[in-house]
Image (cartoon, grey):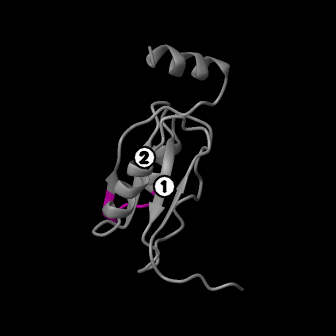
Amino acid sequence: MQILPPGPAVIVGTDIPDLSAAHVSRAFRALGDHDAVFGPAADGGYWLVGLRRSPRVPDAFSSVRWSTEHALSDTLANLVGLKVAFVETLDDVDDGASLARWRQGRR
């Protein structure tokens, strides 16, 4: 079993064309006084999740309906009683239609 060092961890999606270093920096700052941080996606999921890891956060991802509009709300239901922060809502690109919407919004 590998033991990870204490401290915050942030994971981001690879399908977020507007992602910047500033978004990730804000997420780490939020973990200074929150147990978890999320970057909501417009489709009900999330493009970023961060956890403090110390003290240990419960299983945040149990019974999540992945790839649905319920992914964020399901995850938040697993974190009741914890202090949760949010960073900006960004669009993720899941398919051709979402790519077209993202391109249209850039004009």
Q: Is residue 58 visible?
A: yes
State the SS at label 1. strand
In the image, farthest residue toward the right: 1
The answer to whether 58 is drawn above or below residue 6 in the figure is: above
State the image coordinates of residue 58 (x, y, percent, origin top left).
Answer: 49, 70
Mark 1 neighbour density, 10 Å: few (under 14) some (14–19) many (20 or more): many
Q: Which mark is residue 2?
A: none
Left or right relative to 98: residue 48? left
Q: Amino acid at mark 2?
A: Gly
Q: Which residues are magenta?
A: 78-84
Is-magenta flag for residue 107?
Answer: no
State the image coordinates of residue 102 (x, y, percent, origin top left).
Answer: 52, 22
Residue nearest the viewer, comparing 24 with 3: 24
Find disc 1 in the rendering and name its residue: 49
Marks 1 and 2, the one that precedes in the sequence: 2
Q: Residue at the location (45% across, 17% down)?
A: 105
Name the chief secondary structure element in magenta: loop
Q: Quadrant of residue 62?
A: bottom right
State the SS at label 2. strand
Q: Which mark is residue 39?
A: 2
Q: Amino acid at mark 1?
A: Val
In the image, farthest residue toward the left: 33
Kindly check if marks 1 and 2 are in contact, taking CB atoms under 8 A apart as contact.
Answer: yes
Mark 2 neighbour density, 10 Å: few (under 14) some (14–19) many (20 or more): many
Q: What is the CA distance from the residue labelled 1 to the residue labelled 2?
A: 7 Å
State the image coordinates of residue 56 (x, y, percent, origin top left).
Answer: 46, 78
Q: Residue at the location (38% across, 50% down)?
A: 22
Left or right relative to 37: residue 48? right
